[in-house]
Every structure is written in C-alpha cells, then in structure tokens.
Amino acid sequence: MKYELIQPPVYLRSYVRFFWTLEGDAMDALSKVFGSLVDGSPGMIFQQTEGGAFVRDDKALPEIFLYGQTTKHTEIAALGEFRSAGVIFHPNALKSVFGLNAGDLTNSCVDLNLVSSPKKCYLSEKLLQSTSIDNQIEILSSYLHSQISNSHVPVDGIIEYAVSRIMTSNGSVPLKELLEKLHMTERTFERKFKEYVGISPKLFSRICRFQASLQQLKNNKYTRLSDIAFENDYADQSHFIRSFKEFTGCSPFQFQKQQQDAADSNTPVLIK
C-alpha cells in the first residue's frame, strides 16, 4: 500500500488542511490506514473504481464524493485494488467552498456531481486521465479554487476563531469564555456553529479532546491510561475509555494492538 500526504497551495490553506493519495489492494487495510474517521474535519474523496470500490455501511460509495463531520465509529472498506486521492478540509470549510449547510452532511456523504458547479462532470474525467499524482493535486486545487470563487461565501471570522480556540485548547476552552469573547448568545452561536461546522460546539470540543488523547496514545506519551485521561480533562479513566470506544469502536488496548499489527505489516497510518 502506498500513501502520500501533500500540503495545499498557499491560496487554499484557509480551506484545506491537506491533500492525500493512496493506492493498494488490501481489502482490510483501509480501517488501519484511516484510523478513526472521527477527526473533526469534513473531506472529499476521488476513487478510481475499475478494479474495486470503497464501501461504507455495505453501500458502494460514488466515484467522487463529499463527506461531512463523522461523530460515530464507522469504517470504509475496499473491494479489490484501488487508487484514490482525497482532500481534508478545515472543520468550517464546507459552506465557504460549496455553499452548503455543513449540518446537512453530518454522518453522511453525497456524490459531488449533485452539489458542484456546471463543470462538475469534467472533474472525474480529468482526474481519470491524469498520469501523475502531482497533476491530480493540481486539478483538484484548480477545481476548489473555482468553487470558492463561485460560492461567494467568505470564511466566517467568528466561527474560524471559535474553531481555532477549541482546537488549540484540545477541546478544553469553556463555552462561556468563547461567548463572552464573541459577544454572542449561546443559542445564536450554536446555530451558526452547526451551519458552518456541522455539529455543536460541545460535540466538536469532545472530538478535539478525543483526538488529543488519540495522538498521545499513538505516540506512547504516557505511563498509564489514567495519565491520558487526566491530562485531557476526562473525569476519570472510565470516561476516557467510554469516549474512546464511542469514536473508534474499540478500547485503547485494542487500538494499540491494531496499530502494532499495521506497523508489523508496513501499512501506513493516515494521521489527520
């Protein structure tokens, strides 16, 4: 399995965290590569389906599709050989790039051909005809730049600030502190946050806390599991384990074993 992580061009960095490409033929490898899909970010995936297709919940996914926030454990499997390229957006980017209410895509995905501009039908064609990864990233970058120009929805400074504060605090910043800084009522803030991010600020904070604990677990920066729990503001170890299972579908111990199995088989792990 071959995986490559690619930084976006400067003009897309307010919207895109990174691009990635992946190809392989292991039917059970994708869950190991992607890890938990609960990462606080929406994305877009293009798959070349001649030899197989990505499957989620026993349903074949479109050739090119958008997905929103994922708030529960889910897995993407592959049927046969695959080649794919993807985009991981910033948490609040869907509305500015596609003019969508982000909440409409939470725990869901949609064929890009149903939401894109009139030139949508040419994107898959261009990507299929591309002969190199670099060229595919150029095609995707040009497409996204066109979408942003046509959407006429600027990045919302209030939501961008709130997302940044929640992420940099690993989900520990108090909602009351944000509301005082932004001079907004809780109801107005939550409505706007869901529109741009797709989930409530409280759930987004939980996901950021989980991601911080996940990285600590992956990097072996702890002595006991209780260290991870307390350093990430969980009430106790049992609360941490319960949250971990909710977002990954397994216990921390089981996750570590999967990571070791992936390392032993030289399967790359996509860190979001």
Image (cartoon, grey):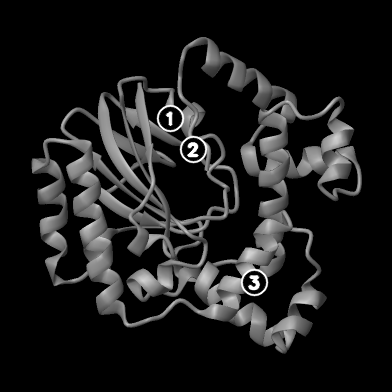
Query: Measured along the vertical axis of the image, is residue 104 above or below residue 234?
Result: below
Question: The disc labelled 2 sits on which kind of residue?
Answer: Glu
Q: Position of residue 250 (x, y in %)?
A: 67, 31
Quarter of the image where one finds residue 263: top right
Q: Secondary structure at mark 3?
A: helix
Check whether the beta carbons of the residues at disc 2 and disc 1 lie within 8 A of each other.
yes
How far is mark 2 from mark 1, CA to CA? 8 Å
In this rendering, position of residue 82 left or right of residue 28: left
Q: Which residue is mark 3?
A: 162
Q: Nearer the viewer, residue 172 or 75?
A: 172
Measure how far apart labels 1 and 3 are at the Cα level: 32 Å
Rendering coords of residue 133 (x, y %)? 22, 37
Image coords of residue 161 (percent x, y) = 61, 73
Check disc 3 and give the amino acid type.
Ala
> For the point 65% across and 87% down, which residue is it?
188
Give the residue pinned by disc 1.
30
Mark 3 and mark 2: span between their CA atoms? 29 Å
Q: Is residue 203 above or below residue 262?
A: below
Q: Earlier in the sequence, mark 3 or mark 2?
A: 2
In terms of depth relative to the viewer, which is nearer, 194 or 79? 194
Mark nearer the N terminus (2 vs 1): 1
> Label 2, on which residue?
75
- Mark 1 or 3, closer to the camera: 3
Q: Residue at x 60, y 49 (%)?
A: 72
Task: Determine the secondary structure under disc 2.
Answer: loop
